[in-house]
Amino acid sequence: MWIPLFITGFWNTNTSSSHLWKTKYTKGWTTPLYFSKVDKSFFAPRLASIQAVQGDLDNIAPQWNDSSLETTLPITTNERPAIPRQHFSHLGDTLDPSLMDSVKKRKQRAKEEPLCIVVIGASGDLAKKKTFPALFSLYYHDLLPKDFLIVGYARRQMTQEEFRNSIMESLTCRVIDGPQCQRKMDEFLPKCHYMSGMYDRTEDFVRLDQFLNNFEQSFPNTRVDRLYYLAVPSQVFENVVHHVHESGRTQRGWNRIVMEKPFGKDITSYLQLRNSLRNCISEDEIYRIDHYLGKELVQNLMVLRFANYLFEPLWNRDHIASIQIVFKENFGVEGRAGYFDEYGIIRDIMQNHLLQVMALLGMEQPVTLHAEDIRDEKVKFLRSIRPLKASDFVLGQYRDRQNPQRSYLSEPGVMNDSHTPTFAACVFQVDNRRWSGVPFLMKAGKALDERKAEIRIQFQSVPGGLFSQVVSSHLPHNELVIRVQPDEAIYMRILSKAPGFTSRLEEARLNLFYRTAWEDSKDIPDAYERLILDVIHGEKSLFIRDDELEVAWNIFTPSLKEMEMAQDSWKPILYDYGGRGPIESDYLAAKYAVQWSEGD
């Protein structure tokens, strides 16, 4: 397949090349230039659906031949090339939604069926800070069904007014505020209802089911679906899912259950949880949410790798020296000490969020954009990672010598002798043809010097000594940097000659800053918005499959057991609040001839 770079403007060329589509400028449309091929027709459905949003299927790209969807060259006419409509027969309504990212199509599907959304744990921080704001934003952007009902369910006793006031505090319109925002809030809140009940009491779930049935009876001749969002600790998953299965299913549409991490503490506890849930719900009905997979830059990783020809030849051990994945927060646990002290930074951040990012960076190209094909490739990559040992880690715990009350051990709910790490750095080894010998470095920590999440692909050094007389030391590595948060960006670090009468070489950057490159970047959806919308549409490519979790726990469990069985030998190193973390993490990287570069 030929991937076009569209250039709008007055273009005229007499150049002839096997990689260039020769054509003259035609008023009113854009001229594509073809530089090289990308494997098969991987992005053809998405390219088609993107253009479909603009309402014109006939001006996407040049003619396709029936056998291979490759461009028919040369084209010497000034007529606008068109794609025969039969090539889009695969874009029917029955197609898996993962092959169509058309917002127009998604909105159309979402409005067809009434929907009941039940937020279990509605009085908690997660529901109030993330779930309800995401639901309101979807409503604000007209992405929820025309007919929907939201029910908050929790143990706390609250009136309807108290419940609506509690969630209203966290609702925002992100970019557009004022009267329009307030009007939307006034429309949204009456659709939100509250019901108090226990998580292990059958009669309470029967009451909930009756309430939902009252809404569903208003639509006697159509499907009605139910979405259960579990914003509760994992300890009550089994009780809630059991009662939803027994008393809360609709027989008139689909039933889907969204679960938040943690999914166990190790491989044993995860398998116990999985086997228990399998007695109540199928894998198709479970949506294990990892909000990092909904972040804009993480979603862009597959496009960056597989839709841009220049990266694939370089994306291997011959050209890449190391890959660094860094997560830093400039604050402590802040009210989550009870939960955090039980799980720690490795289970809270590294085993899920960062490992998912690593899988997207390391996996092979999937056969299609179907969710199962994508997740198959992620599992294959994860299986090629060596299980971690304790010696692969550096652990740390923050303290504040100026203000001891900010130290981790002073947090309410933390034991005075806690060995829970708030910082960890580790190195992964991957045993496959593409990545053998390339260290994947991962670092995560709280109370560090800045808030940042980014990926750094560090390329090999330039061979030879051509510029040795100009540069006193070794030439720095080129780096591709993908900043996930804040200020989303992709940039390449390169060397360039400084301007003027000098031969001095300086580092320069090829920048793609989202906030300046796209007007829409001012309204980038929150990760939870995208993920909840995908649940409604049945799209699972951004959700974690059961065997993914099993392999992930197999990677981390040996090291976790080793560290926890000999805590005195693996006591976290103290580091200062607001610092870079333990210097031992630099020594760990140096063992693999790598230097952390996130400060550059």
Image (cartoon, rainbow, N blue to C red):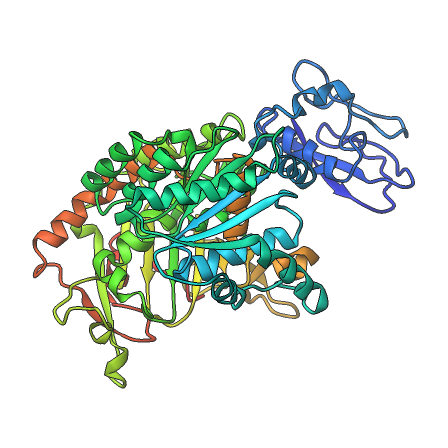
Tell me the quarter of the image containing the N terminus: top right
Q: Residue at x 66, y 70 (%)?
A: 500
203 sits to left or right of 289 = left
* Above/below status of 420 relative to 450: above
333 sits to left or right of 61 = left
Q: Residue at x 71, y 68 (%)?
A: 179
* Above/below status of 317 relative to 572: above
Work out which residue is located at the far bottom of the displayed protein and give it. Answer: 402
Seen from the viewer's position, the closer of residues 352 and 137 is 137
Seen from the viewer's position, the closer of residues 531 and 224 is 224
Q: Residue at x 83, y 27 (%)?
A: 81
The answer to whether any part of residue 203 appears in the image is yes
Q: Position of residue 286 (x, y in %)?
A: 40, 36
Q: Quadrant of residue 23?
A: top right
Q: Quadrant of residue 340?
A: bottom left
The answer to whether any part of residue 492 appears in the image is no
Tell me the quarter of the image containing the C terminus: bottom left
Seen from the viewer's position, the closer of residues 591 and 485 is 485
For the image, the number of numbered tags is: 0
Q: Residue at x 40, y 60 (%)?
A: 123
Q: Position of residue 259 (x, y in %)?
A: 38, 44
Q: Position of residue 78 (x, y in %)?
A: 90, 30
Work out which residue is located at the far top of the displayed protein and give it. Answer: 67
Seen from the viewer's position, the closer of residues 182 and 562 is 182
